[in-house]
């Protein structure tokens, strides 16, 4: 009897310890496969995860033990998953050829197992061939262990992921093949003779000749802001016509977790008539900064808080080459009328400058055109040029920065980002 009693007591102690000190185990199974998807009216074969395109969102709580079983059902391709921005053992990082990880063979599986040591907005994606471009990517959200410990400005009534991505009707293999034929294969917004003429009118023949000579010697185009064009831009896997929608009640505080899961597209993000307060960057809490728009690079994440008061608002993420938008909607759930999307007109496109190429104004030392005169180099400092009018209702601006931000609007700068707890 005493032995049985001791066993019962010991079992009770173990249960008590497990509930107070042991971590919760959060387990997922991810099945990588190929399937037919149709986003643009043309059925194409793409990678799916658990039958979804793109991959499903994964959620954890800080302190969890993550156990993720990844099953590669692809017929003739190794696969992998990289957990972007997570602190974990090297072999779990998911990049084939590093830290003893050799990828996941076809028709086999690999179990990722690690302690979740942080919280915030992150994402995961393939690190094998072009599988990320073909659909193997998804959002990853980690909630704090004690949500009551959130700073007052982080407390919200609703929480949405807004995952941006780019979809192409060509496969990643076809895109790479075309880029090997020519790095400028997808450059469909090149300057024309009319652009050269306008530059001559504003800068003179000598400065224009020197400028064109520089870019030719570098074998680069001023319009090369996006390496690949022809994308349809998505929010949470939906096209603008499919219109991903999040609902709200007026005056609620909503957290929008923006993730740029694109293969190579940068976006300028805004919600017209609605201010955004940035509270986190790449999973790290920052001091609140209120903006009208922000530029988000590939693989970056930003958490923003909005407080909508009207009936509906349109989320607009425009690619920096001005070739299209990802569009979504925030809608008042008390209003049953659905919102039809409005496709905004493209903003003025930018042309790259020497400063964007990493050269200081007037400092062209070491380049093949270093014999240029100081006056020629000064003429090439586009960073001080105003917006140039090309033709009616068509403008061009110089520089990589958010040069087309409407006057009076605040665009986020990296210098605005200050750690909440330095």
Image (cartoon, rainbow, N blue to C red):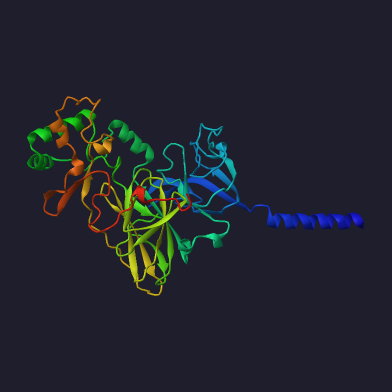
On the image, the x and y values in percent for residue 226 come to 29, 42
On the image, the x and y values in percent for residue 13 come to 78, 56
Work out whether residue 374 can be spotted. Answer: yes
On the image, the x and y values in percent for residue 369 come to 19, 26
- Left/right of residue 191 with respect to residue 248 in the rendered view: left
On the image, the x and y values in percent for residue 322 come to 25, 49
Measuring 35% from the left and 43% from the top, which residue is drawn there?
264
State the image quarter where residue 205 is shown: top left
Q: Quadrant of the N terminus?
A: bottom right
Is residue 20 depicted above or below 261 in this figure?
below
View extreme (front): residue: 422
Is residue 375 depicted above or below 408 in this figure?
above
- Left/right of residue 259 with respect to residue 82 in the rendered view: left
Is residue 124 depicted above or below 6 in this figure?
above
- Left/right of residue 307 with respect to residue 365 in the rendered view: right
Q: Nearer the viewer, residue 148 or 270?
A: 148
Measuring 74% from the left and 58% from the top, which residue is drawn there?
16
View extreme (right): residue: 1
Is residue 390 depicted above or below 150 in this figure?
above
- Left/right of residue 24 with respect to residue 226 in the rendered view: right
> Number of callouts in the render?
0
Q: Nearer the viewer, residue 364 or 28?
A: 364
Work out whether residue 55 can be spotted. Answer: no
């Amino acid at each position: 009897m005493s032995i049985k009693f001791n066993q019962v007591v010991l079992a009770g102690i173990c249960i008590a310890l497990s509930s107070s000190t042991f971590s919760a185990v959060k387990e997922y199974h991810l099945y990588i496969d190929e399937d037919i998807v149709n986003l643009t009216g043309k059925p194409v074969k793409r990678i799916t995860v658990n039958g979804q395109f793109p991959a499903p969102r994964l959620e954890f709580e800080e302190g969890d033990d993550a156990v993720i079983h990844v099953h590669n059902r692809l017929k003739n391709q190794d696969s992998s998953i990289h957990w972007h921005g997570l602190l974990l053992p090297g072999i779990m990082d998911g990049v084939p050829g590093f830290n003893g990880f050799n990828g996941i063979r076809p028709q086999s599986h690999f179990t990722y197992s690690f302690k979740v040591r942080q919280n915030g907005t992150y994402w995961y994606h393939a690190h094998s061939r072009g599988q990320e471009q073909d659909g193997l990517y998804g959002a990853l959200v980690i909630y704090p262990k004690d949500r009551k410990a959130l700073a007052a400005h982080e407390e919200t009534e609703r929480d949405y992921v807004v995952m941006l991505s780019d979809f192409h009707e060509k496969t990643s293999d076809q895109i790479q093949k075309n880029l090997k034929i020519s790095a400028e294969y997808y450059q469909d917004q090149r300057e024309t003779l009319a652009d050269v003429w306008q530059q001559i009118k504003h800068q003179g023949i000598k400065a224009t000749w020197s400028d064109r000579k520089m870019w030719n010697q570098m074998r680069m185009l001023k319009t090369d802001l996006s390496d690949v064009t022809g994308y349809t831009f998505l929010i949470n896997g939906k096209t603008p016509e499919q219109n991903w929608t999040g609902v709200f009640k007026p005056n609620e505080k909503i957290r929008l977790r923006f993730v740029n899961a694109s293969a190579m597209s940068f976006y300028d993000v805004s919600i017209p008539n609605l201010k955004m307060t940035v509270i986190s960057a790449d999973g790290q809490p920052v001091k609140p900064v209120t903006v009208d728009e922000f530029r988000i690079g590939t693989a970056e994440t930003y958490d923003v808080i909005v407080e909508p008061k009207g009936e509906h608002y349109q989320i607009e993420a425009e690619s920096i080459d001005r070739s299209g938008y990802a569009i979504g909607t925030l809608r008042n759930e008390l209003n049953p009328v659905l919102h039809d999307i409005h496709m905004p007109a493209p903003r003025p496109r930018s042309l790259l400058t020497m400063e964007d190429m990493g050269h200081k104004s007037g400092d062209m030392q070491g380049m093949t055109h270093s014999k240029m005169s100081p006056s020629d180099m000064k003429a090439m400092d586009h960073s001080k040029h105003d917006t140039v009018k090309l033709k009616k209702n068509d403008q061009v601006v110089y520089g990589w920065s958010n040069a087309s931000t409407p006057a009076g609007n605040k665009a986020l700068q990296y210098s605005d980002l200050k750690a909440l707890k330095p």
